[in-house]
Image (spheres, coloured by chain):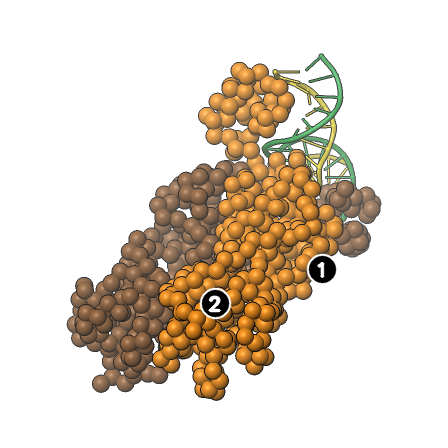
Chain colours: A brown, B orange, C yellow, D green
Amino acid sequence: MPITIADVAAHAGVSKTTVSRVLNGKGELNAATIARVRRVIEELGYVPSAGAVGLARGRTQVVGMLVPSLTWPWIGEVLQGVVDTVETRGFGLLLFTCNQGEESLRRFGQQVSAKSFDGLLVVAPEGTLDYITELHHQGLPVVLIDDRGHQPRFPSVETTNRGGAADAARHLLATGATRPLVVTGPPRFGCVQERLDGFTETWAADGPSPVPPQDVVEGDFTFECGLRAVRQRLADGIPFDAVFAHNDLSALGALHALRQAGLRVPEDVAVVGFDDIPEAGHSDPELTTVHQPLREIGEAAAELLLAQLGGRPPESGAPVVIPTTLTVRGSTRAPD
Amino acid sequence: MPITIADVAAHAGVSKTTVSRVLNGKGELNAATIARVRRVIEELGYVPSAGAVGLARGRTQVVGMLVPSLTWPWIGEVLQGVVDTVETRGFGLLLFTCNQGEESLRRFGQQVSAKSFDGLLVVAPEGTLDYITELHHQGLPVVLIDDRGHQPRFPSVETTNRGGAADAARHLLATGATRPLVVTGPPRFGCVQERLDGFTETWAADGPSPVPPQDVVEGDFTFECGLRAVRQRLADGIPFDAVFAHNDLSALGALHALRQAGLRVPEDVAVVGFDDIPEAGHSDPELTTVHQPLREIGEAAAELLLAQLGGRPPESGAPVVIPTTLTVRGSTRAPD
DNA sequence: CTGAAAGCGCTAACAC
DNA sequence: GTGTTAGCGCTTTCAG
């Protein structure tokens, strides 16, 4: 019942080919014809069937995106960046997750084989990089949003986890800190290792002395882990005058514990946290954050993929890097 | 270059029709033939082209989903529920947002005209309900995820904002509270009005006296608004012994301010907050929350839509309701 | 039980 | 400049 290109052709008194040509702006057409066809299209409210166009052209104008989970707090920002970009370019976004494990991946594989999309954006689920690499080898345009520093053999976008952590270290040192407490995230995440290395290396280089291993406690990105780490520390009586938390929620937990203990932030203890949820990070006026350019990462990744789909070669091998930025909040503490 | 149904047919020595039949389990086929075709399919690793199937059958096996924004903290849970459900049923999910305003909506309209998907799941962007209703009238199966209580004229899924707030009121009353401070969210959200009504009505009915208007302060779902509301209150010297925050972030802010002021929770002041971000809500051991069944809402909505796509009639008119649940945390306070 | 043939709605040579 | 003719890969009558 919907109107097709044939209807438009009939109403305009031309062939389907001609309609197709004005639709796609191909070939030299008589200006009058173009105008007439355009009018009919307008009048009829005709819109080409995406499926038919896809079948005929061999591409779908859809990009697929595979993410480990949609409930990770930072994923929304990335997604928004991606959606905005692909939408602007007239593409659709088909979303997949690996929530059901192996089974999810099997189904995802089917969709790939079914040619449901032209290119893939992926925040690689743990232990899936080989599979993705294979897809890439098989000719599927792929761009990785690299959240854990596995430099793949295909285009990717990443941020400066290492550099951001180094900035945090330098900031704390600049405020006069001498002994930091580091609350990490789950060590299985590459970004955690990067942040840890970036911090400890810079602290060792620019600080009074390297960070002793016992000043690094393993957290899990929750409010509570930050809270507990600080409380434990205070209970143990081991001195510290700064906290570097691997995300904002644990940083908030740390802030909390510090204040409850009657310590002032940043006068007594300065706190810096990586910013996963912008809303959470911005929520405390005393929390200095290392801001991750999540939305920009999504945009850049989508742009990179669309460029490939548009025919451009897969660029150079180097990953696209969008740097973090340090946002200092709270009154500053003068170095003693 | 990819293998098609024709390849399978050739290798199996049958017609495309037969292959199609074993693929779709239609018609009576010779068991031996079925087995043979199956083997060839297996060997060749054949997977039907989604686009071709869609064109031939007139449906895409894809559901569209339109959300106002992907950065809202609670949207991830809903999305995950939706994705899990549609994935399990062999459907794809095409994601759209209205981030770019009117322009987004225009593009979205194109996709719907282009028949890119068979049915629509929607968290209605403000002032878009009429448009969605029209789409529904035009025959597009639609299910609304109703986050602000606009009872539409088509299938929808919602939670008990009113009831959850009533539970919060009863809980606070049970712990002996007599004068609450209410920190709302932006009043333009329907859910805010519902939560406010549910709370105040129950308080008026079961409490010592109705909530006076000046005990209700308008917030914006941030940590800071909760923080400020409490501080202001304390500064004003107006007494209160309970806080009902419209989301978890503002509840955390309130907790924060209370503790900084040396008050104990829940002994001096009990706090209850609606739970937007499960991680945030669970993050404080003293925060009692009204848990929103976000993932279940996503699942239910998807199921409802798939049922329609599967031919079932649009059910009765009543919205599907998934209730909130109250999770009490922290030591209890005995009524005086 | 199985196959031939005619589309689904559109694009892309190849002619005129 | 514009129309004709084949498909894209699959489903679906309609015959046998």
Query: At 38% from the left edge and 56% from the top edge, which residue is drawn?
Result: A147
Residue B151, how many percent across, how many down? 67, 58
Mark 2 and mark 1: Cα distance apart in space? 43 Å
Q: Is residue B215 above or below residue A101?
A: below
Image-based side of B3 in relation to D8, left or right: left
The residue sitting at 65% across, 57% down in the picture is B107
Q: Sort mark 2 into few (<14), some (14-19) or many (20+) by Cα contacts within 10 Å.
A: some
- Give the residue number, with chain letter if any, for mark 2: B174
Q: In this view of the protein, which residue sits in the foreground, A308 or B13? A: B13
Which amino acid does the dot numbered 1 rest on? Asp
Q: Nearer the viewer, mark 2 or mark 1?
A: 2
- Residue to which mark 1 is pinned: B130
Coordinates of residue B270 in the picture (x, y in percent): 43, 71
Q: Which of marks 2 and 1 is nearer the N terminus?
A: 1
Secondary element type, mark 2: helix
Image position of B4 with respect to A305: above or below: above
Residue B131, visible in the rendered structure: yes
Q: Give the left or right position of residue A185, taking residue B302 as reference.
A: left
Judging depth in this view, the residue of A146 and A57 nearest the camera is: A146
Residue at the spot 47% in from the left edge and 79% down from the top edge = B240
Residue B190 sits in which quadrant? bottom right
State the residue in front, A35 or B78: B78
Q: Can residue B111 be seen in this view?
A: no
The chain letter under disc 2 is B
Chain ID at mark 1:
B
